[in-house]
Image: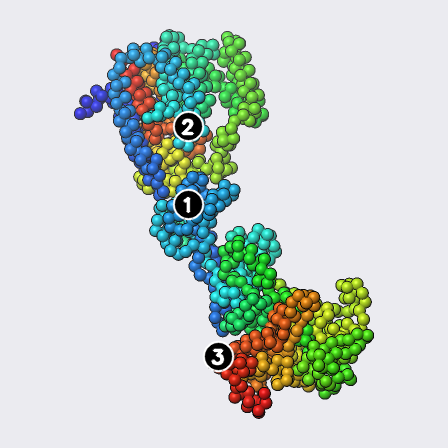
Amino acid sequence: MIRLFERWAVDPALVLAVLVLSLFGIAVIYSAGVVYVPNAVTQHAWLRQGVWFLFALAAFSVLARVPLRWIEWVAIPAYVLSVVLLGVTLVIGTGAGTAEGVKSWINLGFIGFQPSEIAKIATVLVLARLLSQRSEGLSSLREILGPAVLVAIPLALVMLQPDLGTAMAFVGILFAMLYWAGTPVALLALVASPVLGLILSFDTKIWSWYIVAVVAFLYFYRYRLFLFESVTVVLANFAAGTISRPLWNSLATYQQNRILVYLNPEVDPRGAGYQIIQSKVAIGSGGLLGKGYTLGTQKRFDFLPEQHTDFIFSVVGEELGFLGTALAILAFAFVLSRLVTMAKDSPDPFAGLVLFGIFGAWLVHIFVNIGMTIGLVPITGIPLPFVSYGGTFLLMSWVAVGIAVRVAHER
Amino acid sequence: MKVFHPEAMRVRAQGAVIGVVALMGLLGAAFFRVQVLGSTTWSLRAESNRLRQLPLPAPRGTIYDRNGAILADNVPGYAITLLPAPQDSIRATLARLGQYMELPPQRVDRLMAELRRYGRELVVDADADFAVVSALEERRAEFPGVYIEMRPRRRYVGGAATSHVLGYVGEITAEELERASFADARYEQRVMVGKTGIEREYESHLQGERGFRYVEVDAKGRIVGDFGGVTSDPAVPGHDLRLNLDLELQQYIDRIFPDSMAGAVVALDPADGGVLALYSAPSFDANAFVGGVDASLWEYLNTDPLRPLYDRPVLGLYAPASTFKLATAAIALDLGVVGPEDHMPVACTGGWFWGGRLWRCHKPEGHGSLDLAGAIALSCDVYFYQLGLRIGLDRMLRRATDIGFSRECGVDLPQESQGIFPADRQFWNRRFGYSPQEGEVLSLAIGQGPNDQTPLKMAQFYTALARDGSAPAPAIAQGIELGEGWSLHLEPEHLAALREGLRKVTQPGGTAHYAGTLEHWEVLGKTGTGQNAQSVAGLAADHAWFAAIVGPFGGAPEVVVVVLVEHGESGSRVAAPIATKAADFYLRKKHGIEQDTIQTLGEWVQTRGWPDWYRQRYAGGG
């Protein structure tokens, strides 16, 4: 029996962990539907999630067995197709659930799916092909440009939907894969520096000191060798500082509110701050051991927003307490570190890069989703892998697991 | 070293694992802080998060009459309210509600329009039947947005009989909330307050303090159940109020007052000036005003030419006519210009030439020569013209004003008309633009001219005559101290002379013999026929007055009744029977004598023939 599982799973440790997380997710989705005034959607969500879980297992079983070369071969067509689909989504896409104003779904009548989910995996594959052909690490901005553009195309299309959460997942993919491809952390930090500059530019004094720090860092680190690039980084930081105000004004009011509320949820407890306050109340009142499975009062009264999708971790916190949240976080930490270990152990650069792409996407999903439920990160509509309700997301997560075990165990 | 050399990968993997541990550790620490260290704070917040306060309206104080009978109390009422929701869902809920209550399409359309316009909760039925309420309560789960509010509903037991004096309650308006009299913390939106009458006068006494009920609600504000942890904060009922009114008397007056006619009836207790009855005809049913008056009823009440909303006994101003002759007589006696036995130099021949014109008496054949009591009994105008001249215009103006004919009575009601009587000669200049001649006193002496009084004011004056010449301000509520009353400064023998005149009014040959004679009680009365703008123009009849002081034979008077019937034409025929029958009803009740539908001598003669008690009283007269 155990051997059978090992043979099926290919990588028993990883698959067992995500299997447990998926079942845990279905149980929490069931609990999220137990409210005083039930509604048809949330009440039966766990059943639909269960059915999708079976599809996901089937998809995993197939993908864990396809030849690695097929996966390599399919990368470019899949990337092109997903970019086209993302473009199509902007025209005919529909919203779903509470995010009705967003165009992220393509409705095929019998089934709806998010092309951005396919795009994530396709981007990982195509980027892995590109980066695996190098034997030296990337050491300059010019070398990073190619991979960055590959990621920027789907990322920009996703931002236009707009779907900030998925866009952040693409950033995670890019940085994680560049890292595995040997890019120095200092260079990655320099790439990210304009974003930090953008945020800090709201206070002129802090921003001035920040620019001084960036220039000083460049001077000591590598300006002699790469004068042109250093100037580019500084100019990018200046540009970010300059456009920050117009950029802020161009944001929709709800986006501005989310950022303001992140800084202080109590500014608008009934409006934009509502979700984060209600979520913190639920999690905090769970205490050490929680109120018991299905017994969460905040959840039952429907105070929790999106409690079967984006805020599912609030239900975990309220009903299972710190014990439950800590175990769940540990499980996710295990999944992530397992991906790292698999990458380290795989001799094929392509395999390691694919594993790190998946690692980057999941890290962003897990950290942002869990972090936002207690106000550590601004609220972004981003689901928690394996746990949040959402059929195609669960399916694609398992597809990723399938590819991960396939590439890792190719001998 | 190559990038994908195992050693290079091991170093990078180590870095990545450190990153994972750092980020996941950060999450774990954040959860530890919120869930373990901050647990108490957040648990408290979770508790209050799902609690909502719902106001519990306080029942108003009950209003009792002098015998302890309820005039106004509260009955349980229910309002069915719909919490705001998307239009489709409201429409669907209304359709489902339509299975249990009457909701015509027009009403649904109006509610939908209201929702679109204001977007706040909808009161589907402000006063729902209990059957509907219990049907909805049973199916509560089917109606998540429906909220049934318990509201005490004001009930006026006397209905139309007491509507004017008690007034009615209604929801406080935005304008009223601004006023100083509603500055109290108890006054918030949707509170029911007294709008008129006693309800308004004693508003802050009758108003209670609203309480709160704590309920558990979900995020959409739907009530899930009562909250066990916090007991509700009960409403404090308003204070009760006991009035001097007699409900049965009030209802009796309502019954006997001629339908189709307008007028006022006031009954005072001469012992303390308490108001026994204060009735205005035509009336309306104040119960129809509770919880919002129907638009068509409101339209009708405001356009009816008889003006049913007009409170005649305290607001209506009428020429007091002959009922004022007692005031003229009292002033003359007090000034010493006439003695009780004195006759006037000119006997009545149906009129009197003075100042170049003929001043008519109401009886064209004339009354002959009369003493004061006879002049009162027959209401001889010629006598009072001469008496007026003896007093003189200036003294007449000053004394009548001193007595209080241009003041208010000081009754405990929010509104009262002030009597109109000239304080000095300037009055004519100001109002009519000419200087008055001495002859004005002739009109004033018989209760005409620029002299308008409310029925309540005249009742107060007759109460002074029934007592020792002074009368306190009429009091509707018991146990209150109202302002200064009214004093005529009369010597006892002068008072006796006036009463003798009033007594003769109802004796054989007096102006109100038939209507003013009762089996058990002695009636002192005075008729009056008041000219008014319409009657002078010949378009309508004069106003009919009757003032009666009634009590047991040989005892102190126990009730004073003043009746005014607009365009009643004759005081003795129309107004007097109402006054004496009301007094008879009240005194029979008070002394435990069986009620009878045949009360006045006039009624006896028409139905049962001359009664024995009459023969005995007047020994063969008739």
Q: Amino acid at mark 3?
A: Gln
Which quarter of the figure is the C terminus of chain B placed in?
Answer: bottom right
- Tell me the subunit letter for badge 1: B
Label 1 – label 2 distance at C-alpha: 30 Å
Q: Amino acid at mark 1?
A: Leu
Total residue callouts: 3
Q: Front-most of B371 and A181?
A: B371
Within 10 Å of disc 1 (Cα), the crowding (few <14, some 14-19, many 20+) is: many
Judging from the image, what secondary structure is the residue with disc 2 in?
Answer: loop
Residue at mark 1: B94
Spot the residue most to the bottom: B619
Point 34% across, 35% down: residue: A41
Point 48% across, 39% down: residue: A269
Label 3 – label 2 distance at C-alpha: 83 Å
The dot on residue B595 is: 3
Query: Along the horizontal axis of the image, is A105 left or right of B57?
Result: left
Residue at mark 2: A95
Camera-near label (1 vs 2) is 1
Q: Position of residue B370 (x, y in %)?
A: 71, 85
Spot the residue most to the left: A1
Task: Indicate the quadrant where residue A203 lies.
Answer: top right
Q: Amino acid at mark 2?
A: Gly
